[in-house]
Amino acid sequence: MAKKKTPVNDTNLAGGSFTGVDEVSNFGDRLARYGQARTRALGMLNHLRGNPTSESPKAAAGLAGCGNYLHFREYYTVDKVRLHNAQFCKQHLICPLCAIRRGAKALGAYLARWEVIRTERPELRPYLVTLTVKNGDDLQERQTHLTKSLKRLLQHRRSFNAGLRGHAYTEMCKAQGAVYTLELTNKGNGWHPHCHMIVLAASEPSQSALSVEWASISGDSFIVDVRPITGDPSEGFMEVFKYAVKFSDLSLADNWHAAQLLKGKRLLGSFGLFRGVQIPESLLDEPLDSLPFWDRFYRYMGDEYQFTGESPKSHQYEVEKSKNLKVAK
């Protein structure tokens, strides 16, 4: 009997993949998520080939070569497995595998900055803030509406903090820093763009007050959510760095339509103490250069990544090999 496949969904794609979990014990789940992501990407590839447009050939070519092979290194003395080499298309709006890797890099960078901030400013706490606008059939209009409304809200904060006359206090003035992303879903009731934001503040922003302010600015939505991030901060930060598009809520056609409209748009922003965080360009993991390792190679076959071989090459082996090559020259 054929093995039953786990449906491709955002919960499966997200779980644990952004927190930099590289323990050997979690490797099986991690590889399964990557396999699910690749399956969805191939679905998009087939959709583009069956519904060609002027933009689709280049996108399809990128998807065809993305993530076919994954080269991991297992650092067996510390029970870590890290992605050492792979080919990525870097089309995170249509490729869940690249979205996972991109989100992991962003999460790691902002969590590292948070660790520095919490040491220097122990009075600050992180809060997860969500802002929404009314659903609509016109994606471009709804996305533009959200972007402009968010820009106005943040401009009110800047104007009040700068002491400009005629600008009233806003709950966002409590934010000493923030990072936010714009996300998009469509569950059959129209396009639903919204904003997830990590706000650093000494006191919790009032959800009711912010709701009134947001309704005044957006003109069509008072739905705001504010909640403190407790326990492991990566769990709350993960909400911000998941996906610009929620793959499980979109048909392939809607996914492609959204990607075309969002391409080149600024979907991540920051201010205050979170300004200036640099996200690495590479989607690979950082190697543990001082430790011995096993090379492990996987190929995507039959809706999953399958092990194709391993090669034990210790750090000392690489050092000696390098020395021998230099001598030979």
Image (cartoon, helix red, strand yellow):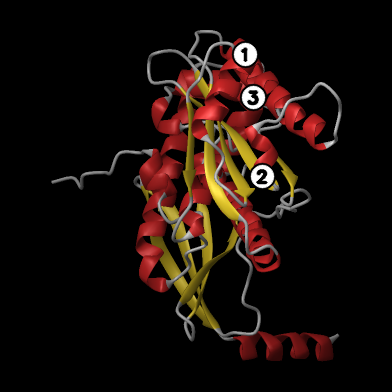
- Tell me the quarter of the picture where residue 179 sits: top right
Any part of residue 136 in sight:
yes
Name the N-terminal-most of marks 2 and 3: 2
- Where disc 1 sits, the SS reads helix
Name the N-terminal-most of marks 2 and 1: 1
Question: Would residue 189 appear left or right of 132 to someone viewing this image?
Answer: left
Give the residue number, with chain letter if any, for mark 3. 262
Residue 220 on image: x %, y %: 54, 11
- Where disc 2 sits, the SS reads strand
Q: Amino acid at mark 2?
A: Ala
Question: Would residue 167 appear left or right of 110 to someone viewing this image?
Answer: right
Q: Residues within 10 Å of mark 2 (few under 14, many from 20)?
A: many
Name the N-terminal-most of marks 1 and 3: 1
- Tell me the quarter of the picture where residue 287 sits: bottom right
Give the answer, above or below, for where 41 lies relative to 255: below
Q: Residues within 10 Å of mark 3 (few under 14, many from 20)?
A: some
Q: As rendered, which of 66 and 216 lies closer to the eye?
A: 216
Q: Amino acid at mark 3?
A: Leu
Question: Would residue 133 appear left or right of 148 to someone viewing this image?
Answer: left
Residue 80 on image: x %, y %: 48, 75
Separation of residues labelled 2 and 1 (CA atoms): 25 Å
User: Circles 2 and 3: CB distance less than 8 Å?
Assistant: no
Residue at point 47% right, 64% down? 21
Residue 31 on image: x %, y %: 41, 57
Separation of residues labelled 1 and 3 (CA atoms): 8 Å
- Where disc 3 sits, the SS reads helix
Give the answer, above or below, for where 268 lies relative to 150: below
Q: Amino acid at mark 1?
A: Gln
Give the residue number, with chain letter if any, for mark 1. 140
Q: As rendered, which of 187 and 60 lies closer to the eye?
A: 187
